[in-house]
Image (cartoon, grey):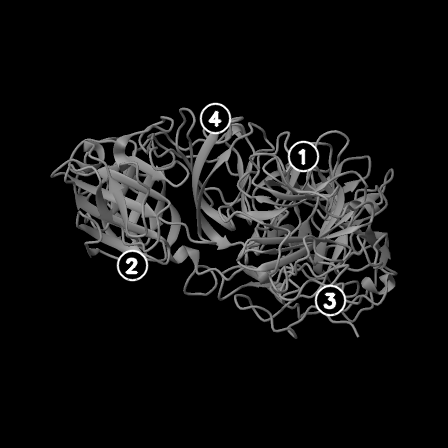
């Protein structure tokens, strides 16, 4: 008996009650696809296609999700596809083959997030009087409205989809194959539906999730949950009741690396059924295929996975498909600049088993004489992130070193506690090359995992403290709003969702100062991050903090008529209270859940003086500004060390300023030097303190590569806000967010140290993704080759729940 994607499984908290159980992997390298030719035509003017899609290889022309017609001279053809080479746009079209487009929509938005799932709906109704209503595209429940090309079908146009011509899922007759995964595919004949027929917004996480379609399918409609795994002939069974079954081609149910029925799905169904790790084409030096589970490469390369190994015991397998010496193991996720390195080399912080029988870490051999492996052997890897113990074995045999992961004894190697690790593959020099297939549990393991160890999927990731419930969403603590000024006193800006305690406003369309206000200093009271000026009172700037936003006056910097603005808003804890944890008493408003506090204090001019920040954990970034006089904005960041500082109002590289008395913050205080910039006696100061919260905020450093295939930063969440600064040389601070840039690619930069208007160019491009950040330009301020940077990022959703972006 088959199991249809359903609510019969308990599933995880944080999602609705409809849980999927299966997806189908389409390997473009195997020319995998499904086909069907309807016996009679359905409604060729009105129909809806809905499917959950997880991308595999990126950048190839026309990866078809569905197509219709024979791609040869003069035939009418149509498809829904990812297209355009490295652009990865979504392309919905109808052609007369060889004679030009009948109609086409090509999105401006790009889709190159391989770590999570997209929900895609295309609704066609050529009977609509308004041309733009004849084809609608939705992604993750939201209609796409930005197109680089948009020519709509003529009134009452008859499309080849739903005609008595060959229809293919995952390919076209021109041999253009999809690579990746599909789940919960619905086709509705005779209705143009909205996404709400197939999905809904989770009431707990706020994320778009699947919903069982309960309507009529029409004559040629079908429902493919890919759950009948009795044989390949039943994988394409139609569960709509119409018996519109599809023929399966080049898809395997043979145990091993070619097995294509997966438990990789967009719901947190169970410990063995959820969104799975794959190898990451955005952070690798090799070539991936087979839904990013097959890897090949040349020499001196490292290939990272899409998941961090966090707060659990994980097991995965790597099967050799070539006998050359290869590197298998784990490495530091923060070192994803992949030029001419192998994971066992110095600087990668990797713990790597070489298939010739050695263990390496940072270029040093830790052990040798272990079992060797060759073609078709399976390397099992078990990692306990709580104890930092790592084991390897061969073909399910004795663990190297003689230990036992289930009992936690005698690991092959014990790793450092200082890094966030992820599974990696790689190769060294000489004739070595990667040639393997990986299994994180989305297909059956070759060997039984040790007791207590789980597959690497989102169900088994730790539950975040922010984002898992309706009352602890990321936008309850930080939110971004955009607005257009009207030049009037008393202009209320709403939509923040809470009463902000710290608001940072920047003009987008005009050259305006960065206005920073907070609740401890009372309103109106402003500072400018691009100036050294003292705090000042101006009655026509931000006049109050309100229950759902704030109110501004008529000042041009915050409310010029018809000018556009963005406001970044943080929630602390109201007006604050006295804090005596430091040698200087401070007034602190602290939100310990979100890792953010505001502290005001009066300097005493004494080096080594301390100020309480109220966070209860060590802050990762502290920004201090003198309020009562002219001074630089002093920035301390976890990646800079105890002696180094940056100026928020400047472009300078890292400097060894005496601002922090060569002392890193503690869980209760930060330390001041005697400099007038940060601790002048009798002067008043404000400090903004930020601590890392897993799944919500992240701080770190990275190295740029100066490429459109830029450095990848793993954050562990889908970012809403990111701020970068170059540290090895001069460079502007710059900020991006998803309220100004609602889809990828993101280019709209604003500058904390400048009054410039918003700027976007190809050199500024980044993609903000389900699990991190990918640079797509060579801008010196964010991705110059060999340059070093720091960053601060805040989440839209934790990766455990995120959809692809």
- SS class, disc 4: loop
Which callout, 3 or 4, points to the residue nearer the camera? 4
Question: Which one is closest to the eye, mark 2 or mark 1?
Answer: 1
Mark 3–mark 4 Cα distance, whole angstroms, equals: 53 Å
Q: In which quarter of the image is residue 362?
A: top right
What crowding class fits label 3: few (fewer than 14 Cα within 10 Å), some (14-19), or many (20 or more)? Answer: many
Q: Residue 800 carries which label?
A: none
Of tags 3 and 1, which is closer to the observer? 1
In percent of width and height, residue 326 lies at 73, 40
Decide: is 528 above or below 542.
above
**Residue 355 lies in what quarter of the image?**
top right
The reply to whether callout 2 and callout 4 are in contact (CB within 8 Å) is no
Q: Name the residue under label 2.
A: 547
Q: Position of residue 729 (x, y in %)?
A: 42, 24
At horizontal 77% and vertical 31% (from top left) the residue drawn is 431
Residue under pointer 4: 780
- Provide the residue designation for mark 3: 217
Q: Do the residues labelled 3 and 1 touch (CB within 8 Å)?
A: no
């Amino acid at each position: 008996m088959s199991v249809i994607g359903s609510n019969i499984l308990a599933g995880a908290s944080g999602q609705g009650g409809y849980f999927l159980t299966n997806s189908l992997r389409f390997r473009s390298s195997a020319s995998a696809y499904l086909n069907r030719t309807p016996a009679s035509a359905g409604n060729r003017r009105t129909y809806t296609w809905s499917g959950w899609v997880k991308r595999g290889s990126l950048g190839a022309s026309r990866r078809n999700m569905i197509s219709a017609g024979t791609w040869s001279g003069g035939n009418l053809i149509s498809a829904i596809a990812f297209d355009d080479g490295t652009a990865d746009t979504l392309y919905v079209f109808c052609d007369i083959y060889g004679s030009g487009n009948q109609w086409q929509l090509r999105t401006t938005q790009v889709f190159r997030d391989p770590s999570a799932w997209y929900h895609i709906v295309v609704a066609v109704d050529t009977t609509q009087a308004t041309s733009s209503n004849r084809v609608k595209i939705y992604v993750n429940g939201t209609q796409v409205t930005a197109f680089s090309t948009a020519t709509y079908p003529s009134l009452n146009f008859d499309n080849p989809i739903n005609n008595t011509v060959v229809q293919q899922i995952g390919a076209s007759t021109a041999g253009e194959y999809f690579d990746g995964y599909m789940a919960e595919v619905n086709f509705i004949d005779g209705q143009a539906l909205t996404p709400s027929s197939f999905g809904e917004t989770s009431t707990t996480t706020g994320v778009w999730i699947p919903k069982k379609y309960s309507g009529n399918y029409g004559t040629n409609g079908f429902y493919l949950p890919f759950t009948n795994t009795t044989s390949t002939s039943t994988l394409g069974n139609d569960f709509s009741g119409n018996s519109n079954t599809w023929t399966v081609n080049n898809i395997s149910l043979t145990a091993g690396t070619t097995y294509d029925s997966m438990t990789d799905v967009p719901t947190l169904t169970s410990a063995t059924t959820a969104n799975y790790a794959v190898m990451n084409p955005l952070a690798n030096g090799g070539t991936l295929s087979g839904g990013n589970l097959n890897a090949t490469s040349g020499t001196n390369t490292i290939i990272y996975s899409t998941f961090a190994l966090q707060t659990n015991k994980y097991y995965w397998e790597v099967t050799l498909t070539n006998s050359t010496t290869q590197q298998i193991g784990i490495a530091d996720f923060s070192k994803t600049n992949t030029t001419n390195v192998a994971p066992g080399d110095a600087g990668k912080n990797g713990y790597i088993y070489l298939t010739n029988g050695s263990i390496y870490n940072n270029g040093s051999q830790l052990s040798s004489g272990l079992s060797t492996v060759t073609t078709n052997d399976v390397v099992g890897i078990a990692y306990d992130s709580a104890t930092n113990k790592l084991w390897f074995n061969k073909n399910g045999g004795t663990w190297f070193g003689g230990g036992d992961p289930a009992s936690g004894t005698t690991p092959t190697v014990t790793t450092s506690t200082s890094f966030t690790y992820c599974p990696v593959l790689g190769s060294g020099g000489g004739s070595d090359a990667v040639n393997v297939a990986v299994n994180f549990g989305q297909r059956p393991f070759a060997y039984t995992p040790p007791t207590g160890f789980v597959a690497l999927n989102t169900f088994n990731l730790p539950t975040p403290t922010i984002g898992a419930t309706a009352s602890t969403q990321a936008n309850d603590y930080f939110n971004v709003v955009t607005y257009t000024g009207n030049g009037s006193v008393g202009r209320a800006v709403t939509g923040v969702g809470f009463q902000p305690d710290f608001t940072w406003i920047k003009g987008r369309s005009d050259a305006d100062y960065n206005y920073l206000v907070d609740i401890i200093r009372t309103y109106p009271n402003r500072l400018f991050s691009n100036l050294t000026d003292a705090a000042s009172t101006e009655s026509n700037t931000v006049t109050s903090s309100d229950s759902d936003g704030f109110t501004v006056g008529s000042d041009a910097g915050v409310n010029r008529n018809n000018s556009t603005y963005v406001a970044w808003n943080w929630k602390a804890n109201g007006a604050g209270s006295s804090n005596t944890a430091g040698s200087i008493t401070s007034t602190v408003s602290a939100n310990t859940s979100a890792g953010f506090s505001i502290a005001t204090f009066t300097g005493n001019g004494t080096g080594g003086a301390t100020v309480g920040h109220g966070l209860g954990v060590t802050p990762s970034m502290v920004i201090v500004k003198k309020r009562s006089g002219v001074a630089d904005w002093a920035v301390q960041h976890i990646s800079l060390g105890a002696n180094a500082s940056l100026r928020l109002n400047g472009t300078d590289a890292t400097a060894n300023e005496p601002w922090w008395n060569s002392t890193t913050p503690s869980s209760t205080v930060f330390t001041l030097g005697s400099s007038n910039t940060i601790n002048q006696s009798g002067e008043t100061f404000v400090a903004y303190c930020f601590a890392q919260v897993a799944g919500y905020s992240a701080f770190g450093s990275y190295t740029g590569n100066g490429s459109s295939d830029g450095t990848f930063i793993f954050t562990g969440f889908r970012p809403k806000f990111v701020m970068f600064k170059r540290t090895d040389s001069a460079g502007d601070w710059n900020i991006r967010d998803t309220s100004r840039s609602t889809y990828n690619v993101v280019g709209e930069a604003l500058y904390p140290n400048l009054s410039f208007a918003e700027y976007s160019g190809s050199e500024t491009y980044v993609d903000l993704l389900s699990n991190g950040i990918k640079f797509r330009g060579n801008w010196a301020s964010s991705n110059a080759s060999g340059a070093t940077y720091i960053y601060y990022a805040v989440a839209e959703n934790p990766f455990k729940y995120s959809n692809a972006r």
